[in-house]
Image: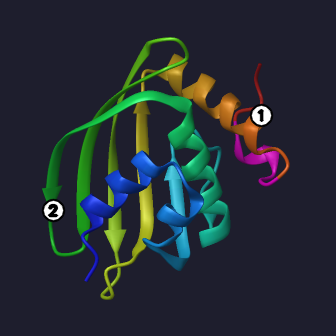
């Protein structure tokens, strides 16, 4: 059985697609405040998560609560030259211990929009741009 919290935090430290992919079921779904709509599938989700991990200048997981199927992780981060972000990530796993659903909630709104634009620009050759905020 995979230790989801440990695997997730290690994947952020590694900043690699393979580290994230190792924790995902094939049909994993990502919902996030930086996305216009959910995105599905290991390949797309691992690309987004590895890219997002590289946007952060610092990321600290501050609290964790775990149930049979879900892990809740609160976090604080810095990005974009020291801008503070906070949020919560909810990881839902299947009976095999692989992540089938991710919900990531960033705040504040100004950072959410900037983060979405950053992901859109970095991933435009891999992920359709209409998954991200269309503003400037």
Residue 93: x and y, percent? Answer: 34, 74
Do we see residue 49 in this rendering? yes
Name which residue lies at 29% across and 66% down: 4
Residue occupying image coordinates x 62% and y 67%: 40
Marks 2 and 1: in contact by CB < 8 Å? no
Say if 120 sits above or below 5 in the image. Answer: above
Q: Nearer the viewer, residue 114 or 24?
A: 24
Residue at image point 42% right, 48% down: 12
Q: Is residue 123 left or right of residue 40?
A: right
The one nearer the camera, 59 or 97, is 59
Tell whether 16 sits left or right of 95: right
What separation in Å lies between label 1 and label 2 (alpha carbons)? 34 Å
Residue marked by disc 1: 121
User: If you read the primary sequence from the N terminus, does the residue marked by circle 1 or circle 2 appear first?
Assistant: 2
Furthest-bottom residue in this view: 96
Q: Which residue carries the number 2 mark?
A: 66
């Amino acid at each position: 059985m995979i230790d989801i919290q440990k695997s997730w935090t290690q994947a952020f430290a590694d900043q690699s697609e393979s580290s994230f992919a190792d924790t995902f079921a094939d049909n994993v779904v990502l919902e996030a405040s930086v996305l216009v709509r959910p995105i599905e599938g290991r390949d797309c989700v691992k690309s987004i998560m590895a890219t997002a991990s590289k946007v952060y200048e610092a990321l600290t997981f501050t609290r964790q609560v775990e149930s049979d199927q879900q892990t809740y992780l609160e976090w604080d981060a810095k990005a974009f030259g020291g801008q503070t972000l906070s949020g919560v990530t909810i990881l839902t796993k299947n009976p095999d211990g692989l992540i089938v659903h991710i919900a990531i909630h960033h705040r504040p709104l100004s950072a959410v929009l900037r983060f979405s634009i950053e992901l859109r620009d970095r991933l435009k050759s891999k992920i359709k741009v209409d998954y991200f905020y269309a503003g400037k």
